[in-house]
Amino acid sequence: MSTRGSTSGVVANGNGDSAADDGKDAGLASEGAREMFKRLTDRPADLLRFATAGSVDDGKSTLIGRLLYDSKQVFSDQLAHVEEASQRRGQDFLDLSLLTDGLRAEREQGITIDVAYRYFATAQRRFIIADTPGHEQYTRNMVTGASTADLAIVLVDARKGMVAQSKRHAFISALLGIPHVVVCVNKMDLVDFDEAVFAAIVEDFDRFAARLELPDVTFIPISALLGDNVVDRSDAMPWYQGPPLLYHLEHVHIASDRNLIDVRFPVQWVIRPPSTSVADYRAYAGQVAGGVLRPGDEVLVLPSGQHTTIAAIDTLDGPVQEAFPPMSVALRLADDIDVSRGSTIVRPHNQPTVANKLECLVCWMSEQALSPGRRYLVKQTTRTVMLGAADVRYRIDVETLHRDETARTLELNDLGRVHLELSSPLVFDSYRRNRLTGSLIILDEATNETVAAGVILDTEVEEPGGEPKHERSPNVRWQGSRMTRARRWTSLGHGGATLWFTGLPGAGKSTIAAAVEERLIEARQPAFLLDGDNLRHGLNGDLGFDDQARSENVRRTAHVARLLAESGTVALVSLVSPFAADRQAAAALHSADDLEFIEIFVDAPLALCEERDPKGLYARARSGELAGLTGIGSPYEAPSTPDLVLGTCDETVEREVERVLELLAARGLIAG
Amino acid sequence: MPATYHLSHLRTLESEAVHVMREVAAEFERPVLLFSGGKDSIVLLRLAEKAFRPAPFPFAVMHIDTGHNFPEAIEFRDRRLAELGERLIIASVEDSISSGRAVDEIGPRASRNGLQTVTLLDAIAEHGFDAAFGGARRDEERARAKERILSFRDEFGQWEPQRQRPEVWSLYNGRIRRGEHARVFPISNWTELDVWQYIAEEGLEVPSIYFAHDREVFTRDGMLYAVSPFVELIDGERAFSASVRYRTVGDMSCTGAVESRAATLEEVVAEIAATELTERGQTRADDRVTEAAMEDRKRQGYF
């Protein structure tokens, strides 16, 4: 809300010299006050946190000063202070950078030494600026300032172009998973507002950023000193068609940057009043880190693994019907089970990883290098555990993105990949999936300092050549889409999953799967049937029916299903898939990506299948014409723990379809 | 899934503050909440209710009493704590002076504002507190703009701006040695307007001096001060009656009033939204002493 801005139409006190002047604006007419109050409280303003990064002379402080000044957010006493200080320094212009330079040491040395926070508001949004210095030696401060940012502004001096610092800032923005990056090419006035200069920097940045995961990058040519394209559109650069910086900040879409899919509730604190005041009250307090929780939801407590149901979601203002990020609430559970600080509450069919080994990228923030001789602790969500071993895999040169695999340690401001082994398990997701459950800090037990910040990697995707045994192209990097799953699914209004129908030929898998597909599509949930026979006409047309080929058939189908699920479609796989190990691999492929994989065993008796024999396969097998048919000449390994068993011939197909849909509803995949 | 699960900026700030309070309650052994009777610490009390009810607060509430407080603030303090049923500790600057730990300033411009630091640090040591919640906000002042939410203090209570611990995501490092403590500022990211809007939304009571009232005042250095037994008028200063209200509630000797007719919460919010002067610049003499006044006091262990 532009409280001091011209857009709000509020007439501010024109004379700020003294409160004692005459107070003519004090006590606005009650009517006006009520109207203004209403305007302030009625509009659901949202909050945008952004970080600014630039090298020493890129004009970052001036840009922030300009943003505050031109959006009329500078108080008159602050401005008087800046005028006075500018004069004292013999400057003949208003040095807006003085609005942000804070501490004595900084003023004396003319530098910025730490993250400073600024606040301003316009009619559209409230803003929190984390003003972070661009010195190489202060990488840790950019990490500090930008870790929670929705958006990062990277300043580039038009005269210098992309320098080492710009690359560092871009890299850290990608490392921290900042959803939106704005590259401000500053000091355009010093290059005659030349479009070619701007275009060359855009090209340089794009070339570097192509190797990073930056989902949304915007370029704006500005002059912070003169104000071009900061708040107001520049007349000097008619070739630039985009919006000025402030407009972009006000309108960039951030609502879908949160993860509303994967339920994650790290328990901070147990609320248990003495029984004398409230009888038998016990609630688990925390801030929702992902997903939407509702009373009645079946939940799982990790790492203990106990199941229960949410009885109520409490706040001081009474119970609520749903809790979502970033709400702080207290959950009451239906059963009296062991839950304490450090537990994480999730949904049973969308689980994070629970492990005491993990891979992460860390930024080392201490003057004392990572040393095997020191004792460290790791804090992640609300859990703190001992660090057993930290194995440096490589150090990254952020300017060339070269990986130095000979590195054995990390020093102050180094970034590198580290394998951590912990004294007890953590409950985590990859950082790209969830910034809260995928981040950690490392503490030095002796000095109590925070020595490193780390983001947890998704090893399935980010470690090619590691896990999948069929990987023959280890140097191919996973190309990040501009869409996160949360954004995609939220925008589409539905998510995806894989239903895996397994069973003997003729058991009725395709009949049920096709009927389910029809029902889902009618309910506007995209669904797609992947029928084993159909796939063998194309994608898997090169495969025979020996054991290895069958495994490969399953593997390829699982990958296709995973992509469909990720895209927001329910993939219905109808495939004999006779071997338990292959189905487990398919399930693991999904769970590594936190995708639902539902195994449905269509368990019709062999005699019945043979009697139906819709494709004449059994007849041909019995006659010896077809060798190795599952059930006749080749084994079928029945699932030991399927999610659902169908096909036992005491139910109609319609009823079986209902049971599949009920299961999907119970797991929150479709509306019940 | 509906496309918008929207939390307003105020509720986002509230949730963040509640998270901080619960983290500190869980990770420290003996926290304390510093309460002045002012609007910011009134919000802190409300946030503590949000974080811990229906249980009692897992910490005591402490007031550093300069002895020069507005009587309205003291009356409000006692009533509010009684309503909440929480324990109040009063640490008195008067006691620090009589025990010789602190020396009262003399002269017409004397203030006990600086002396509070001695009393505060002594009380923290005496009670063995290892974390103290305060209502400071980053928008108040340039040194505060650079302070962490969880701000480490050495065994002398000092703040060392160049040696602050990195504060990333919402992962707070609560590890300290015996004798050290942390200051915790759950509403670091709130602005003055946020505080007032929150007070209005929550329907919180504040001391009457925040609303326009008639008071005997005098003008000094361009600010209005209340006539009280704690302040001497000097040459040329004369008392007059005016309709004023306070933007901050501190020691009577250094807290200025603003002329105002804002008599309701709505009017106060509207007035704050339209003001052109910062809260501390307009009403706090303690920040006007030198360019780095707050930075220097914080380094010594001030709030």
Image (cartoon, grey):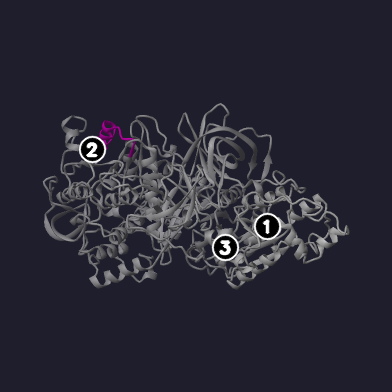
Residue at image location 38% in from the left, 69% down from the top: A6
In the image, the segment drawn in magenta is B115-131
Are tags 3 and 2 found on a single chain?
Answer: no
Number of the front mark, 1 or 3? 1
Q: Mark 3 points at which residue?
A: A489
Say which chain tag 2 marks. Answer: B
Please state, as top left, top right, bottom left or bottom right, where the C terminus of chain B lies in the image.
top left
The CA span between labels 3 and 2 is 58 Å
Is residue A252 toward the left or the right of residue A466 in the image?
A: left
- Mark with earlier residue (1, 3): 3
In x, y percent, where is residue A387?
54, 33
Circle 1: residue type: Asp
In x, y percent, where is residue B60?
27, 41
Q: Can residue A107 be seen in this view?
A: yes
The CA span between labels 2 and 1 is 82 Å
Residue A603 numbered tag:
1
Is residue A267 toward the left or the right of residue A658 in the image?
A: left
Q: In this view, does B27 lie above or below A251?
A: above
Circle 3: residue type: Trp
Are tags 1 and 3 found on a single chain?
Answer: yes
Q: Mark 2 points at which residue?
A: B115
Quadrant position of residue A39: bottom left
Number of the front mark, 3 or 2? 3
Is residue B213 toward the left or the right of residue A307 in the image?
A: left
Residue at the limit of the structure toward the top, as seen here: A373
The verdict on residue A121 being magenta is no
Toward the viewer: A21 or A469?
Answer: A469
